[in-house]
Image (cartoon, grey):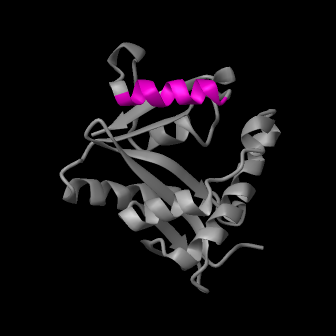
Amino acid sequence: MTPDLAVALRPARPEDLDSIRDLERAAGRIFRELGMDLVADDEPPSVERLAAYQDAGRMWIAADGDDRPVAYCLVDLVDGATHIEQVSVSPAYARHGLGRRLIELVAEWARESDRPVLTLRTFRDVPWNAPYYARLGFTVVPDDHLTAGLRALGAVEERLGLTRWPRVAMRRG
């Protein structure tokens, strides 16, 4: 069944946070197909952590016709850039451009906030990660050009065990 793609992009609200956690769990399951069970089983951010993003105005969702979250994006500020911390789309709504739409919304917010450079960290070889972001205009940042903040995020990923699969930092703008 194809979902109704009449979605609206909007800032996240407190009442969205539990649904976003469920959405993240569902979206992560696809990593199991690549043998990335650690990623598939990763617990989503807590409601408190999501609330901090929502309170700071750095969290957006795509809402379905019933105003339920079907995709979301979290943004941090790293070394003066707008850093996309997470983009997740419900499997029922995947491959319909919602991630791209959220990223473009963030890009607009970033320009208006005088932080037009977008960065992110992602898996290099996962088709819906680095190759997808490259199609959206992101380029890989060579290790010797990483900012201190991007290096620090990489160190956190290493502690979490995520670097058992190649990771890269990417930049647009």
Residue 146: image quadrant is top left
Q: Is residue 138 magenta?
A: no
Residues drawn in magenta: 149-160
Toward the front, the furthest residue is: 48
Q: Is residue 124 visible?
A: no
Determine the residue positioned at 65% across, 65% down: 93
Asked whether residue 157 is drawn in magenta, I would say: yes
Rendering coords of residue 116 (x, y %): 24, 47
* Quadrant (top left, top right, bottom left, bottom right) of the N terminus: bottom right
Residue 127, by quadrant, is: top right
The residue lying toward the viewer, choosing from 131 and 65, is 65
Residue displayed at 39% across by 48% down: 76
Visible residue check, residue 137: yes
Q: Is residue 19 left or right of residue 154?
A: right
Q: Is residue 9 above or below residue 119?
A: below
Instruction: Please indicate whether residue 138 sits to the left or right of residue 35 in the image.
Output: left
Figure check: 89 above or below 66? above
Q: Which quadrant of the figure has residue 165?
A: top right
Q: Residue at x 81, y 40 (%)?
A: 33
Number of numbered callouts drawn: 0
Q: Is residue 148 left or right of residue 2?
A: left
In the rendered view, does 22 fall on the left or right side of 13? right
Q: Position of residue 56 (x, y in %)?
A: 37, 62
Horizontal and vertical percent for residue 171?
Answer: 36, 35
Q: Residue at x 36, y 13 (%)?
A: 144
Q: Main secondary structure of the magenta part?
A: helix
- The image quadrant where one finds the C terminus is top left
Instruction: Point out residue 162 in the picture as x, y percentages from the top left corner.
Output: 65, 29
| Residue farthest toward the top in the current orientation of the protein | 144
